[in-house]
Amino acid sequence: MYIAATICVMLIPRDVPARANALNGASAVRRALDEIREGWHFAITHRVIFIALLQLALTNTLILTMAEMVPGFARRVLGLQPEDASMSSGPPAWACFSPASSSDVLDIMSRANSSRSAG
């Protein structure tokens, strides 16, 4: 999957940025804050990007919450040691969470397709 993503990124045409004046009297902190402000303004004014950022934040919150629950779940329900509940430990530990992960991936893909057709 990473190889396919790398190839897809390599197919994107390069952007030639305009030269910025580095010596315009603004401090590095001010320029950084201006860049952040400009980026947030762009994301908020473009509905598709804003929705994608919201979905990313929600998905990350859910996945990180689920990752915090895995050690307790493994100990109490599966009877495993918490260190055995990693994704690399094999099916017993993560099989309970894989349906949720697969549905998250399918949900993200379907939302991306629907937002492309809407935007």
Image (cartoon, rainbow, N blue to C red):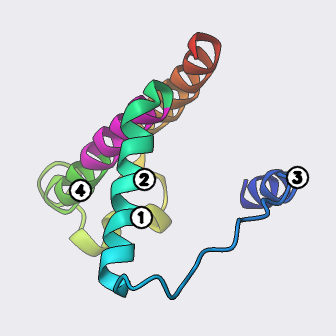
The answer to which of marks 3 and 4 sits earlier in the sequence is 3
Which residue has dot 2 on it?
39
Which residue has dot 4 on it?
70
Distance from disc 1 to disc 2, alpha carbons, whole Å, reads 6 Å
* Left or right: 2 as drawn, with respect to 35: right
Which of 55 and 1 lies nearest the eye of the viewer? 55
Q: Residue at x 47, y 52 (%)?
A: 91
Which residue has dot 1 on it?
35
Distance from disc 4 to disc 2, alpha carbons, whole Å, reads 35 Å
Mark number, residue 68: none
Q: Residue flagged by tag 3: what amino acid is it?
A: Leu
Q: Marks 2 and 4: in contact by CB < 8 Å?
A: no
Q: Which stretch is magenta?
A: 49-62
Q: Is residue 97 visible?
A: no
Q: Secondary structure at mark 3?
A: loop
Provide residue 94's location: percent of width, then percent of height.
39, 51
Query: Looking at the image, is mark 1 or mark 3 nearer the viewer?
Result: 1
Q: Secondary structure at mark 1?
A: helix
Q: Marks 2 and 1: in contact by CB < 8 Å?
A: yes
Query: Looking at the image, is mark 3 or mark 4 nearer the viewer?
Result: 3
Q: Residues within 10 Å of mark 4 (few under 14, many from 20)?
A: many
Distance from disc 1 to disc 3, alpha carbons, whole Å, reads 26 Å
Q: Residue flagged by tag 2: what amino acid is it?
A: Gly
